[in-house]
């Protein structure tokens, strides 16, 4: 992805994998193209055909909405041209340093294979959800951004790895690890917690921790932290009836009062103000 030609880039608050909205032009060509890092492209609109040549290998490919292209590290083309109708696609890059930080040495190496004309509804909806969050201010915070990024890494590793790898059994957190993680969360509800911070509390990689956490608690770290924040905020609403709702929202890690109100309503079934008046 090239930020100079992107239609839109992720908001600066986004702390997940790098993303951009890239144009699909009606016609064009390029030569001697090499990918240094893996990239995933999911078309939102636009149709047409593409002609790729790499050495003696030639491919004729189509472009269509919701079609996925995965280009692994080292993918190269001697020449490519395309024509069709204009559109756009969501692109996700996988910088080695960020991927290594999230996966660390507990998971198999991230090495997606180059694949063309893929249709995978689960992968498409995940990428579109990531872009919606990344492009609109990342109101759900770093934990949510990292959770989505880890989910994408896991899905790509499971379905589109360059080489098969044996499955690794997912254990559960021990009683002591559960207490440690819960104490860490409860002591930092006002902070923009990250999966990396939570994983460090029990000396795991973010990737392995996310799977173990969900197996243990039945929900993602982001969902668990959100529920704990709402529980703590509910207690504050009850104990401090004169305290402004906006103040309570910020005190328990919500970016804005509007974000708190929407999360509270979805969880409790009423807005914070109405819930407080009913106590």
Image (cartoon, helix red, strand yellow):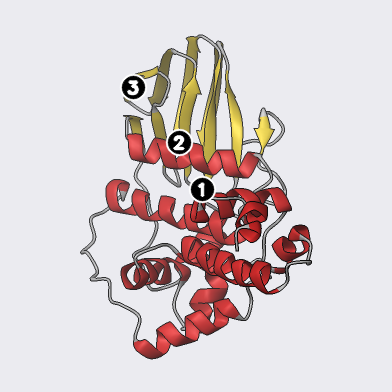
The foreground one among 278 and 253 is 278
Give the number of callouts: 3
Q: Dividing the image into 4 quarters, which one contains the C terminus?
A: bottom right
Q: Is residue 215 left or right of residue 182?
A: left
Quick one: which residue is furthest to the front in this view?
A: 278
Marks 2 and 3 close (CB-CB < 8 Å): no
Quick one: which residue is furthest to the bottom in this view?
A: 176
Q: Position of residue 207 (x, y in %)?
A: 42, 66
Residue 143 versus residue 197 in the image, above or below? above
At x 57%, y 64%, the residue is 230
Q: Which mark is residue 276?
A: none
Q: Which mark is residue 58?
A: 3
Q: Is residue 77 left or right of residue 246?
A: left
Which element type, helix, strand or loop, lies under badge 1?
loop
Which element type, helix, strand or loop, lies under badge 2?
strand
Counting residues from the N terminus, which is met first, the one under dot 1 or under dot 2?
A: 1
Q: Position of residue 112 (x, y in %)?
A: 37, 48
Q: Quadrant of residue 179?
A: bottom left
State the residue position of label 1: 37
Q: Position of residue 86 (x, y in %)?
A: 55, 13
Counting residues from the N terminus, which is met first, the one under dot 1 or under dot 3?
A: 1
| Mark in the foreground, 1 or 3 | 1
Residue 193, can we see it?
Answer: no
Q: CA distance from mark 1 to mark 3?
A: 22 Å
The foreground one among 58 and 1 is 1
């Amino acid at each position: 992805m090239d930020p100079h030609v992107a239609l839109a880039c992720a908001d600066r608050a986004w702390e997940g994998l790098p993303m951009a909205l890239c144009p699909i032009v009606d016609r064009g060509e390029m030569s001697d193209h090499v990918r240094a890092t893996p990239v995933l492209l999911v078309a939102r609109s636009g149709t047409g055909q593409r002609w790729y040549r790499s050495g003696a290998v030639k491919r004729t490919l189509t472009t269509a909405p919701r079609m996925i292209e995965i280009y692994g590290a080292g993918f190269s083309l001697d020449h490519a041209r395309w024509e069709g109708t204009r559109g756009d696609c969501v692109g996700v890059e996988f910088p080695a340093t960020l991927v290594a930080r999230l996966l660390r040495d507990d998971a198999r190496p991230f090495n997606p294979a180059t694949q063309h004309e893929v249709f995978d509804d689960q992968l498409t909806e995940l990428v579109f959800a990531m872009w919606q969050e990344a492009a609109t201010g990342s109101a759900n915070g770093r934990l949510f951004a990292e959770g989505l990024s880890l989910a994408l890494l896991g899905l790509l590793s499971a379905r589109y790895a360059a080489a098969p790898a044996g499955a690794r059994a997912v254990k559960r957190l021990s009683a002591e690890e559960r207490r440690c993680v819960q104490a860490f969360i409860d002591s930092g509800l006002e902070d923009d917690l990250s999966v990396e911070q939570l994983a460090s509390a029990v000396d795991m990689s973010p990737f392995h921790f996310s799977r173990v956490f969900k197996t243990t608690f039945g929900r993602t770290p982001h969902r668990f932290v959100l529920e704990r924040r709402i529980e703590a905020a509910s207690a504050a609403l009850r104990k401090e009836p004169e305290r402004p709702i906006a103040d309570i929202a910020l005190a328990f890690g919500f970016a804005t009062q509007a974000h708190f109100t929407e999360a509270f309503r979805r969880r409790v079934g009423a807005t914070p103000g109405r819930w407080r008046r009913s106590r």
